[in-house]
Amino acid sequence: MRRTAGARHRRPLALALLALPLAWSAAAEELPDAREIARRAEDVLRGTSAYTEGEMTIVSRRLPVPRVVRFRSWDDRGGKRSFIRILAPAKDRGTGFLKLHPNLWTYVPRVERTMRIPPSMMLQSWMGSDFTNDDLVRESSQLDDYDHRLLAVEEAFRGLGGSGPSRAFVLEYRPHEDAPVVWGRIVAWIEARHATPLRQEFYDEAGVQLRRMDFGEVRETGGRHVPHLWVMTPLDKPGHETRIQIDEIRFDEAFDDAIFTTRHLKGSG
Amino acid sequence: MLTLRLAWRNVWRNPRRTGLTVAATVFAVVLVMVFVSMGAGIHEQMIEDAVRLSSGHVSVSGEGYLENRTLEQFVRFDAELARSLDATPGVAGWAPRVVGFGLLSNGPDTQGIAVLGVDPEREATVTSLPARVREGRFLGEAGAREIVLGRRLADALDAGLGDELLLYSVAYSLEMAYELFRVVGVMRLPDPALDRGLALIHLADAQAFFVYDDRVSEVAILAQSAEHTGEVAAAVAGVLPGDGVEVHGWPEIMPELVQFIFLDDAGMYIMLLILVVVVAFGILNTLLMSVLERRREFGVALALGLRPRAIFALVYLESMALAGVGLAIGLAIALPLVLWLVGHPIDLESEAMRGAYELLGFEPRISWKLEATHPLGSAITIFGVAVLAALYPAFKASRARPVDALRSV
């Protein structure tokens, strides 16, 4: 199913390339379109929708032992909506996050309150981790909010924990002028064959690298080569690190609309 | 002595011209005095207002707090630190506080705010915050989970007294921190940014909320006055445990205020400089006219053997006399005037002016402060002007050649 859809996509592109001057087409045949690589990478991580169960571990010098948060999430990329439910620790159990574009809501069961998190807070820490609210509920899109350019091809990229070596495309993402993002640019390493994201580096407008995300434990799930371990390292906070370990991930399911309601937010499912 | 009497008589040979020049000098002296002491008064008021809204004259905080202002920078606040602060000379008051950031929510409305944990009694010894409550009351007991908001913040959240608001943040332990706080007071803060973005809770409640134990973000210390900032900072630094703790005076805490005062002063001095230059030309004009009128006189005196140096001195004394009279009358008017103004600060009534001051975060009031340097500075300036202005006329008079001078009308 997927493959045919992909081929249908590629045909007009190929035709367009034929129309270009020879020198151009020669280069283009060797290296695929940067946006297409980025699209495939985004698809590997998110599909059109993704249901995830996993565990987030926050490591900090402040903490004698790392803090662990268990969650399940529904990411409906097509509907621009998502839902996250906290399962553990017990103190925060039942806490929910609901994103219905452009709003983000959170529900805190202990005080039985729903709160709207304003867009200006999208880049604040999510539950004390090194991920932002935006990283989790994906208000911005690495595909739609950026222009993509192929910088290089690395033949032997070694990823998290020395994994690989694998052939990787090195892409640069630059945000559109009016895009609701803070990064000046993102540099992404994407495995050439399966479009599995391997690493992303986030730079501010002045070109200073602020954080790095490494992907590891790539396993085949639902026809994709999906990284099951995400490690976010903030470079301005030495000693900090947040890992997300994915236990289960299912792609391209049709979600029940009832999931993305404030009623569900206040429930416990 | 003879020269002096001669100079004095010469000055009054044309009383009207001299009178006008003296009047210009008097005007300049009064203006300089009023403006300089107004600048000093307004700036002192600004500093006092600012330190009483922020961290006092001196702040003790964790290393790197000024640059980062996160929970990561802290001071351990214990009984020992309290005792040493009490025993430090020059400390007029001190208050420990926790500064954090969070979201404050009431129903559908949410605002990102700075939340300040304060000890209500101690806070009153340093800042004006407790006195700024306009509705309800200030914070009470520890553990009561009460909150006091700025007026604009209360409006933005559509919150009134008695409402329970959800405060939401990330604790020092990197847990989610959330708690309901009951609104007990609404304050009016002159700085709209603070008025819209500051909420106060009890120090103990803040330490519990942020899982902060006995940590505080800073200890705000009030000195007797801004002038004692340096001494108090040094004295406090002397009694501190040391490691990982920093002491800052208000100029470091509020560099923008220092810059503002510098720019404001620069603008004022440029204006006064223009005024003084105008007066200088007035004196120059008067002296030159009187010297040119007396060419024949000087010629005779030179022919009779008077030394050029004596004539030079004569003209100089005339200039000094002119300036001296102007200065004396000027100070006689300016000193009582400024002293009266010191006791009668002007509260601004016009909405536009109030708005402009509030935008900068200051009380809309013009006040004066008289310092010994002000009359002294005026005197030096006016005499300096007289010295410069007399240079050319004196030179001209003493260099006259008797033959030419006698032949002229």
Image: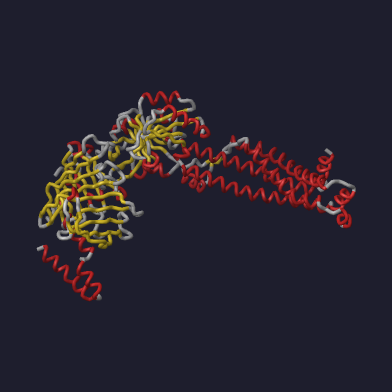
Image quarter in which the N terminus of chain A is found: bottom left
Q: Position of residue B242 (x, y in %)?
A: 39, 30
Q: Position of residue B323 (x, y in %)?
A: 73, 43
Foreground residue among A260 and A237: A237
Counting labels gives: 0
As rendered, which of B201 and A200 lies closer to the eye?
A200
With respect to residue B28, does A10 lie above or below? below
B134 left or right of B383? left
Q: Is residue B126 above or below residue A250?
A: above
Based on the displayed image, in which of its 4 quarters is residue A89 positioned?
A: top left
User: Is there any visible trace of residue B165 in the rendered image?
Assistant: yes
Furthest-right residue in this view: B304
- The answer to which quarter of the image holds residue B109 is top left
Q: How is the image coloured?
A: secondary structure
Indicate the position of residue A255 as horizontal and vertical percent values: 13, 53
Quadrant location, the C terminus of chain A: top left
Which residue: 54% across, 46% down? Answer: B264
A219 lies left or right of B185: left
The residue located at (66%, 41%) in the rendering is B378
User: Of residues A181 and B356, which is closer to you in this image?
Assistant: A181
Which residue is found at the position 10% from the left and 54% from the top?
A220
Vertical arrangement, residue B397 with respect to residue B185, above or below: below
Horizontal and vertical percent for residue A196?
17, 56
Regarding residue A78, the answer to whether it shows in the image is no
